[in-house]
Amino acid sequence: MTLLLLLLSSFTPAHAGNIADEAEVNFQLARDAYNRGDFDTALFHFMVSNRLSPNRNVTFNIGRAYEALGKYPEAYRWYQDALEAEDTPSEETVRKILESLDKIEDRIALFKVVTDPPDATVYIDRRNLGSIGQTPLDIPRRPGSYRLIIEKPGYETVETEDYDLQRTGTQIEVDLKLVPIVGRVSIEGEVGATVHVETEDAPPSCEIPCVLELPEGKQILYFRKPGFRNQPNLIEVFQDQELELVADLSPITGTLIVDAGERGALIEIDGAPVGYTPAVLTDVQVGSHELQISYGGYEPYRATFDISEDETIDMGSIDLNPLFRVTAASRFDQNVAEAPASVTLIPQEELKAFGYQSILEAIVGSRGLYPTNDLSYEGLGVRGFSRLGDYSNRILLTADGHSLNDNVFGSSYLGLDGIADLQDIQQIEVVRGPGSALYGSNAVFGVINLVTKGGGDGYQPHVALTGADQAIRARVGAGIGDESVGAWASLSGMYDPGRDYEFREYADTPSQGISEDADESLARTLHAKAWAGNLTLHGMYTTSEKEIPTGAFQTNLGDHRSANNDYRGFLEARYQSDAPNTKLDLRLFYDNYANEFIGPYGVGYLYNDQNHDQWFGALAQLNQSLGEAMSLTLGGQTRQHFITTLESFEIEALDAEPFNQPLDKDAASQIYSAYGVLDLHPGELVTFNLGGRIDRYETADTDAGDPTSNTYAHPRGALILSPGDEVLKFIAGSAFRAPSPFEFFYSDGGISQVPAAEGLSSETILTGEFEWTHAYSEVLTHTVSGYYNSINNLIDTEIIDDNGVFRYTNIDAPVRTAGAEVELRRWWRSGWMLASQISWQRTRTGGFIDGDALTNSPILLGSFMTATPLSPGVTLANKIRGESARLTQAGYLTDGAVVWDVTLTGTLDRPTLEYGIGVRNLLDWPITHPGGADLLIDELPQLGRNFFATLRVNL
């Protein structure tokens, strides 16, 4: 025991003066008394020594004296005081104190008192005995019954029930939430500002708008928010009353100058839209901010900036990087470099800068694509293939993935009969190659997808007017909402009185080959889209009424009554979820199509075709990520064509009853499909894409010889290598096209056409393709591709008599095409773009070397496109497109052609006024396209030099 006292005495601090000497003397007396067992005397002298010179050592010995006297609650309390003394003890000292506490813990009863807030004063039984400390507090007691009284200024006093501590070793934990004596303060004003009580550095008590309960009396509140001046407010709070307060903060601002290569890009600061590039933004609050600049088709630019009071920050000209995203290649969004197809993207900048008026006008000049026009319908040739009279039914046209081809002819309407203008289109995706592995019939040579504008594309209310030679176009549109919830709608129309023609094939007829006032056309489109979260409703209705100036189907040449009228509409409801690893696409849709052909023959005799098609359907698609190296897409679709009718009437006038009906056919059908795509990424440089689709067709009427049902299965596979700046694609696949009801059943009684040959069956294509793309920079690439196509059972027309009557049949010999394409492209950035390509394609029926050349198939295609900014907001665009000769039905060759288009577009008082002027076929090059089996005309003249001007006012 003496050794323990000596050890602890070594920690006694030395002080000069009499008090220190007196304290030391009392400590020595206490130690001597303790060693001889006189604990009362020892306790007295330890107390005196601690009063004269408080320290941990003396405090600990007081506890030991109490313990020796059997006064364990007092000993416990003094041991606690020794442990909590202000000086820093050694580990050995702490260990000995804790051991002493543990030794007597079972000999006392203990209160453990905690309050919220802390620092409340604690009394036992009554106040006049004095407080025993402040919370949090451990209170040692002898067994008995005790009541706690707890007080804290500004809070209601708490008097607990009696606690019974019946025996030693008992512990009672008391945890109390003190109730403040408060009034209420309701604070409105600057949303997001924090409220601090008493000092501006105090922790925030709430965020405006909010309601605080504060202790009664005078209080100081500080309102703080980055970018605003701190504002103190002195208030007085009364119990059970509510004070209303408005926080009016003064902003501290600077100036931000923002420009981007893409004019009109949306500027957002901290998620709030603040303008469009270029912009000088004053009153930007000081502090740290998140800047985002976004423009459709480009990766958003994001940056953090700190701005000080009255500071001006110039962000410079910011280059936005193109996204190169495509959805049509795999039915989900992906980078073009990863898509298992040869893809060309036509962004909104190109649509606007070149003044494109139709889908066909926008896509021709891309690799392997060329136009064809029989003056009734415009069509598209792809990689050397465009059959006369096929109505472009080997191309699938979609809008946001919804098929727009009809089910009577299978046509993809690429001219003004599809959509009256392109101002609702954000981007056009051209996906070459067989697409039946995902889309079924019609996607033989590729898919063209119209990406319509969505919530983030800035749809402004507007009116627009375009004049082109004699034609005129007009539109009006409006939009509301934002990216989360919103809608837009537009109405557009076009009227063209047409041109007059002279056809030498009709020189010996009463018309003398002159076709006058028989080329009028009228097109209208109602287009609308609405969205809310993951739901989208999209609809479009287009009408096209076109007079036929060519005497097609042996009608009277130049008779203005001769016309093709088409009416096409759809409405689709779509749900898309976009979880990190799972993407779900659900669609319900209704479509309708109607076609009317009016054919005047002789005097007072009309032939009237009326074709109708209505269907509804559903699609469900799941894209599931299976880890970093694999993803799987599974989908199913059904289309129920509950009305598909083909009717023909012989009449004397359009309002007269028919005297004969040579065609009355019901061709209702059902289609059930399932497809899947597996994407494998065994390494960063390698991608395997494997996909396939099964389609089952069930047809109600099969007079032409096909069975009542048929099943088609077509695969597609791709290997994609991405070493460094290179992308190499090896693609193989097959596709099919089922005969359309028109090809199966149509007959005008033998005037020009009879039903298909017996056993007409689907045609198929096998394709192999290689594509190499090298990226010189983010926007400059060159592409080299080669491909081989083999079409079996090609559905084509054949002349069956000397009067030119034809029908559809399968050609026994395969049709083979080999081709190569080279392209250099500088993608849109800062208003500049450049694209140049040349395509070689050789198409033969039978043997590839010695087979017969295919009609309407030029061997060479080429184009050169450039857009140059002349000044801010003004762009000059040039497009030169050339092609070699085409073989006609009569065995002649058309002349090659070079078409040069020039367009100047710009804005005034951006974005209030947009304008464009241009000339098509600047060189006035004489162009002819081959005619089909329905025509006596072998070569059809195309439009020469023509001008246009457009004006759009954004409201």
Image: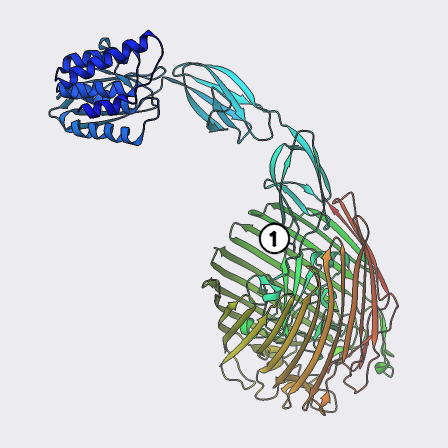
- Residue 911 versus residue 67 in the image, above or below: below
Picture residue at 82% right of the left edge, 80% below the top:
894
Q: How is the image coloured?
A: rainbow
Q: Position of residue 465 (x, y in %)?
A: 77, 52
Question: Front-most of 236 and 568?
Answer: 236
Quadrant of the snapshot with the C terminus = top right
Amino acid type, callout 1: Gly
Picture residue at 18% right of the left edge, 14% below the top:
42
User: Is 824 left or right of 720, judged from the image as shown?
Assistant: right
**Would you say residue 872 is visible in this rendering?**
yes
Most extreme residue toward the top, as rendered? Answer: 18
Question: Front-most of 529 and 858?
Answer: 858
Q: Position of residue 310 (x, y in %)?
A: 69, 29
Picture residue at 24% right of the left edge, 21% below the top:
60
- Residue 233 versus residue 866 in the image, above or below: above
Question: Front-most of 270 and 484?
Answer: 270
**Would you say residue 393 is visible in this rendering?**
no
Residue wearing tag 1 = 454
Question: Front-most of 141 and 424?
Answer: 141
User: Is 512 left or right of 663, judged from the image as shown?
Assistant: right
Q: Position of residue 785 (x, y in %)?
A: 68, 75
Quadrant of the snapshot with the N terminus = top left
Q: Secondary structure at mark 1?
A: loop
How many numbered callouts? 1
The 10 Å Cα crowd at callout 1, few under 14, some 14 to 19, many 20 or more, is: many
Dividing the picture into quadrants, the one containing residue 92 is top left
Q: Position of residue 532 (x, y in %)?
A: 53, 49
- Residue 512 versus residue 173 in the image, above or below: below
- Residue 891 versus residue 386 in the image, above or below: below
